[in-house]
Image (cartoon, rainbow, N blue to C red):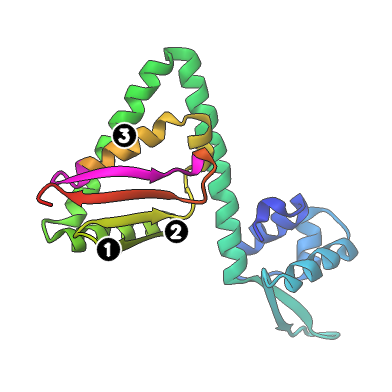
Amino acid sequence: MAIAQQPSTKQDILQYLGQHSSATAQELATKLEISQQAVRRHLKDLANQDLISYSAKSQQMGRPQHAYQISSKGRESFNQSTSQNYSAFAVSLLGTLAETVGAEQVSQILSKQWQRKAIEYRSKLGNGCLENRVTKLVELRKAEGFMAECHSLESSDGFMMTEHNCAISNVAESFPGICGHELEMFAQILPDCTVERTHWIINGEQRCGYLVRSHNL
């Protein structure tokens, strides 16, 4: 479950635990300026979702306290929430730019950004066979948050590259032209190929699909 769906106090707890090796309920209550009872209620919910873990912390006097740590799942979920915040900021920034310099100028800026991205991708893909390059491209997209995969076509030497999510969906929904620049980027990355979009999430489909065919076919 993404942190964006959690109440803000739970986000605060996860953020604090993400910045510290561990913390007790008392420490969290003091930091967040709420009661220990409220903190323990939130900690119980977070533990039930496997977003935090805990271990016994001995004291000089009294019973051991629980020391809470953020789990790998909690850190991943928190990073996901942070990514969503950055997406919202990007949409707002592009909207401000469009109001300031005009939509056409924003389109040119986005096109330039995708051209830079294409150069970065091409340097990483190398000059191997098409299958190796498409496979490397899919791995790069995965590293950037896309649920990407590729399959060879039985009828030819082409490939179908599929992305089951969109890591920039918030931006694409507000500025769908960005997807056109992305398609141009794929064509620049694979200059010996024709790249055709076959499916598009923005159109309500479940995935974005790209048909990649060599010019030599």
Position of 61 relative to 171 (above/below): below
Q: Amino acid at mark 2?
A: Met
Which residue is painted at 77% across and 52% down in the image?
Answer: 7
Q: Residue 211: give x, y in percent of width and height.
A: 30, 50
- Numbered label attached to residue 113: 3
For marks 2 and 3 on the same chain, the one whose residue lies earlier in the sequence:
3
Residue mark closest to the camera, 2 vs 3:
2
Instruction: Look at the numbered disc 3 and give the secondary structure of its residue.
Output: helix
Residue to which mark 1 is pinned: 152
Q: Can you identify the residue that label 2 sits on?
A: 147
- Label 2 Cα neighbours within 10 Å, binned few <14 / some 14-19 / many ≥20: some
Q: Residue 70 sits in which quadrant?
A: bottom right
| Mark 1 surroundings within 10 Å by alpha-carbon count, few (fewer than 14), some (14 through 19), many (20 or more) | some
Residue 190 forms part of the magenta stretch: yes
What kind of element bears circle 1? strand
| Label 2 – label 3 distance at C-alpha | 22 Å
Per the rendering, the mark at residue 25 is none
Q: Is residue 146 visible?
A: yes
User: x and y percent of residue 207 in the render?
Assistant: 47, 51
- Label 3 or label 1, whichever lies nearer to me, is 1
Q: Residue at the location (52% across, 32% down)?
A: 91
Front position in the image: 130 or 138: 130
Which stretch is magenta? 188-202
Between 160 and 146, the residue placed more toward the observer is 160
